[in-house]
Structures are given as C-alpha cells and as structure tokens.
Image (cartoon, grey):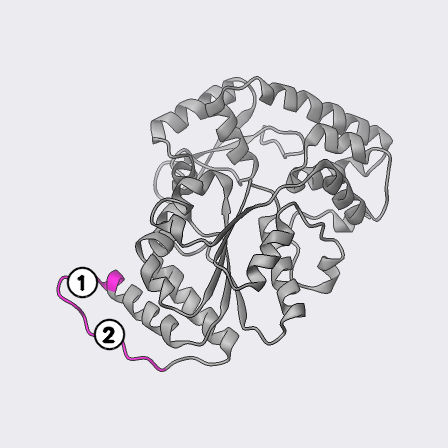
C-alpha cells in the first residue's frame, strides 16, 4: 500500500497513468496542446505540475503517435544559451536527426553567449516541427529572456512550446512582451474531491481518515502524500497527523502576507539559504528582507536553521519549515 505513496513525479507510462488524477485545468491544457497552441501551465509548489506535464505528454502520444515531442527538464540551465543548447539536442533526438551546422560568423561587439543563442535559434528554425514540454524553467534568468526578449525569434521557429511555471512567477512569465507569446495560460488546482480520489488511488483503499486528512492538510498533492504515508500506519497515527496539521494550518492563518508568501515557497523546496537566487527571484525580495523574514519565522518556530560546510568559504546557513512530517534537524 505505502509503495505508491512516493514523492517522485508520475511519469509518462501506463502504470503511472492509473495513479494520475487530473487537476482542474488539465482538460483545457490537453485541448490547447492538441491545437498546437503555445501554453503556460501554472501551479503552486507541490501542485503536481511535473506529473501533469508527463501525463499530458502520454495523452498526446496516445492520440497522435506520430507527433514529435520532447519533455525537457531545464533545471540545470541558468542562461538562455544553456537552455537553447538543451532544446536543440532534445529536438534532434525527438526528430531522429541532428543538423550539421556551421557556427555563425561573429557580429561586431557580440559576446560568446549571444553568438551561442543565435546559433541555437538558427538550428531550431531549421528543424522540423516539435512539441516541447518544458519543466523547471528559471523564470527570471531563462523564461523571460526566451519568451520575452527572444519572443519574435521563437515565433520564427516551427515548434510548439508548453511550459510549466510557478504561480508566484507570473510577474516574469507574463511580463510584456512575454505575455503575448502564450496563447493559453492554464492554472492547475485540486478540488477536495479530486484530492481524496488521489489518495484513494495511491493507497488502493478508502480508509476513513482520508477525508479528515484532506480537510486538515489541504489539497496540495505533495503535502497530502507525505501526510498519508504517516497516517497509513494505523488509526492512531492518522489521528495524530490530522491534529498536527490542523494546528499547523491555524498557525499559518495568523501570518501576515509577507510571511505567508515565504512559507508557501519554503514548503515546496529543499532547504535553502538566504542567498538562494531562485527563491529571491521568485519572491522579488532583497536579501536583507528575506533574512529578516526567515529569522522572524524561526523565532515563531515555523522555520529552523542550521549551518552546513560550503567548500573553502564560510558555512552556509540553511532554512527549512518545521511543518508536520518534515524531518527535523534538531
């Protein structure tokens, strides 16, 4: 039973398809993808965006087996040039061929990065049409430069672009001129009924504690699966999980907006430092604001911190929430 209560995303395979419960917005996303529209898919951290993207890929393959598609994880790409390099490679694999392409001649005052971007865009333009499903795109560093600054160049390529992003990153993902690139913007969310069904499929059972778990934890799949893993031991554990999450939600309800935003981000992330560029970029805060808010949450017992060696420099101070079910350092 507990073997299906894993935190890893569902993949594009039939075994995982049987576990997938479509969130609100998925049917609309599938329709838009079928039409060949460029689409932005948004969701909160832990909302199951990666699982939904894989299941979208599977559904498209079943409907259109000849359509070239490529799921590309851009987590390692920290620049447009790096992202485009991964996309060129992925498109070549999806289409079954790679272009023999001479690098373009350098232009006056052109940097190596700019030349690399130009070369990759030329290769993408020369390739046949492919549907890209992009995950883990850095909103400020990669997504806005690609779909905003380079928007017109991407429009010149024959490809379809389906990209996942976090709701809080809307200000970068939909910042003009990127807003015009997306022909559909779809937000994924789970209802309480869908969340209960999700747990029933993962558990292959319908224990009485499922409804109270959803009521106390909420509908976020990542938190639900973690809570259900603990609750599935026995009825006593289930009662403790419900009580712990009810108390946690009450504490979160008393936070101001700034602290609430940060807690939502920390809940969906690995331990982070106050210098984490992704977190700072997503929140749009200065480092001093982040440190001040983290320390306030730590005083309130909602966050804990510890030091970790960081090569030859000073140890890094890392922060994580103390939410129920999360391993404690102390």
Residue 45 vs residue 24, the one in the foreground: 24
Q: Where is the C terminus found, in terms of image quarters?
A: top right
Distance of mark 1 from mark 2, alpha carbons?
Answer: 11 Å
Counting from the top left corner in percent of width and height, residue 149 is at 30, 54
Q: Position of residue 107 (x, y in %)?
A: 16, 68
Q: In this image, 5 relative to 108: left or right?
A: right
User: Which tag, 1 or 2, sits closer to the chain's start?
Assistant: 2
Q: Residues within 10 Å of mark 1 (few under 14, many from 20)?
A: few
Residue 109 position (above or below residue 100):
above
Q: Which residue is denoted by mark 1 in the rendering? A: 110
Residue occupying the point 42% across, 46% down:
173
- Residue 112 located within the stretch drawn in magenta: yes
- Image: magenta residue range: 100-114
The percent coordinates of residue 276 (x first, y second) are: 41, 39
* Callout 1 touching callout 2 (CB < 8 Å): no
- Crowding around mark 2 (Cα neighbors within 10 Å: few <14, some 14 to 19, many 20+) is few
| Residue under label 2 | 104
Residue 274, by quadrant, is top left
Q: Which mark is residue 170?
A: none
Q: Main secondary structure of the magenta part?
A: loop
Q: Position of residue 49 (x, y in %)?
A: 58, 49
Above/below status of 103 relative to 208: below
């Amino acid at each position: 039973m507990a073997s299906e209560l894993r935190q890893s995303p569902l993949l594009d395979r039939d075994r995982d398809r049987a576990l997938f419960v479509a969130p609100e917005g998925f049917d609309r996303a599938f329709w838009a993808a079928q039409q060949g529209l460029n689409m932005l898919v948004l969701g909160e951290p832990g909302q199951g965006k990666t699982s939904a993207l894989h299941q979208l890929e599977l559904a498209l393959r079943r409907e259109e087996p000849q359509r070239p598609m490529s799921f590309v994880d851009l987590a390692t790409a920290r620049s447009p040039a790096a992202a485009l390099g991964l996309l060129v490679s992925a498109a070549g694999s999806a289409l079954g061929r790679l272009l023999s392409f001479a690098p373009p001649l350098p232009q006056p005052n052109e940097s190596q990065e700019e030349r690399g971007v130009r070369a990759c865009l030329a290769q993408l333009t020369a390739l046949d049409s492919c549907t890209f499903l992009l995950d883990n795109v850095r909103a400020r560093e990669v997504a806005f430069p690609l779909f905003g600054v380079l928007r017109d160049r991407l429009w010149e390529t024959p490809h379809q672009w389906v990209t996942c992003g976090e709701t809080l990153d809307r200000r970068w993902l939909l910042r003009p001129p990127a807003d015009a690139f997306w022909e559909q913007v779809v937000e994924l969310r789970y209802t309480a009924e869908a969340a209960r069904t999700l747990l029933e499929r993962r558990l292959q059972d319908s224990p009485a504690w499922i409804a109270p778990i959803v009521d106390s934890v909420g509908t976020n799949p990542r938190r639900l699966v973690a809570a259900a893993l603990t609750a599935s031991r026995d009825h006593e554990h289930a009662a403790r999980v419900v009580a712990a999450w009810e108390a946690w939600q009450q504490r979160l309800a008393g936070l101001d907006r700034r602290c609430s935003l940060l807690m939502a981000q920390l809940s969906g992330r690995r331990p982070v430092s106050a210098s984490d560029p992704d977190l700072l970029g997503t929140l749009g805060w200065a480092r001093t604001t982040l440190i001040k808010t983290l320390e306030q949450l730590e005083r309130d017992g909602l966050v804990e911190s510890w030091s970790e060696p960081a090569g030859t420099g000073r140890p890094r101070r890392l922060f994580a929430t103390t939410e129920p079910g999360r391993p404690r350092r102390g």
